[in-house]
Image (spheres, helix red, strand yellow):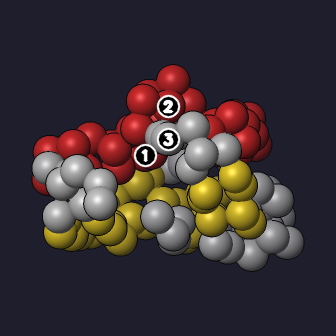
Amino acid sequence: MADPISRDRAAAFYDALATRDPDRIAPFLDDEVDWLLIGPVELFAFCGQHVGKDAVLDVFRQIGRTEEAHGNVREFLLVDDDCAAALTRAWVPRMALSASLPAQPAT
């Protein structure tokens, strides 16, 4: 069983995710992380399953090059022993749309 996660550590992890900065995200990832980013692949080519720390950090590098977040709000954070979950909403403008498209990353 994994060690318990503090609420502060979980919040720091989600704050790092919000920056989309691989250097800030890296300390939170295990070398064998199995990451699933759910979303429409037609709009977000980086969605899907990514295995390994390097693969996940590459996804965030790709996101940083191709997507610009105009807002990011964590609506709630749940922490229970060695698990944490959050509902986070990010607003990402798309060139083909006349308005921002709200995206909801699964974490």
Q: Amino acid at mark 2?
A: Ala
> Image check: 36 left or right of 46?
left
What is the spatial separation of the Cα atoms under label 1 and label 3, in whole angstroms?
A: 19 Å
Q: CA distance from mark 1 to mark 2?
A: 13 Å
* Above or below: residue 95 compared with residue 58: below
Image mark for residue 102: none
Image x and y of residue 44, in percent? 76, 62
Residue position marked by numbered label 3 in the rendering: 30
Q: Is residue 47 left or right of residue 81?
A: right
Indicate the quadrant where residue 39 lies.
Answer: bottom right
Residue 18 position, x and y percent, is: 43, 46
Residue 60 in view, yes or no: no
Left or right relative to 44: residue 37: left
Q: Secondary structure at mark 3?
A: loop
Say whether marks 1 and 2 touch (CB < 8 Å).
no
First in sequence, mark 1 or 2: give its number. Answer: 1
CB within 8 Å, label 2 to label 3: no
C-beta proximity under 8 Å, tags 1 and 3: no
Q: In the depicted view, which residue is nearer to us: 51 or 21?
A: 51
Residue type highlighted by circle 1: Ala
Residue carrying label 1: 18
Does residue 45 sit above or below 55 in this rendering?
below
Q: Which residue is labeled 2 in the image?
A: 26
Image location of residue 63, percent across then percent down: 68, 44
Name the residue rendered at 46%, 64% in the picture.
107
Quadrant of the drawing holding the N terminus:
bottom left
* Whether residue 50 can be seen here: yes
Instruction: For mark 2, give the secondary structure.
Output: helix
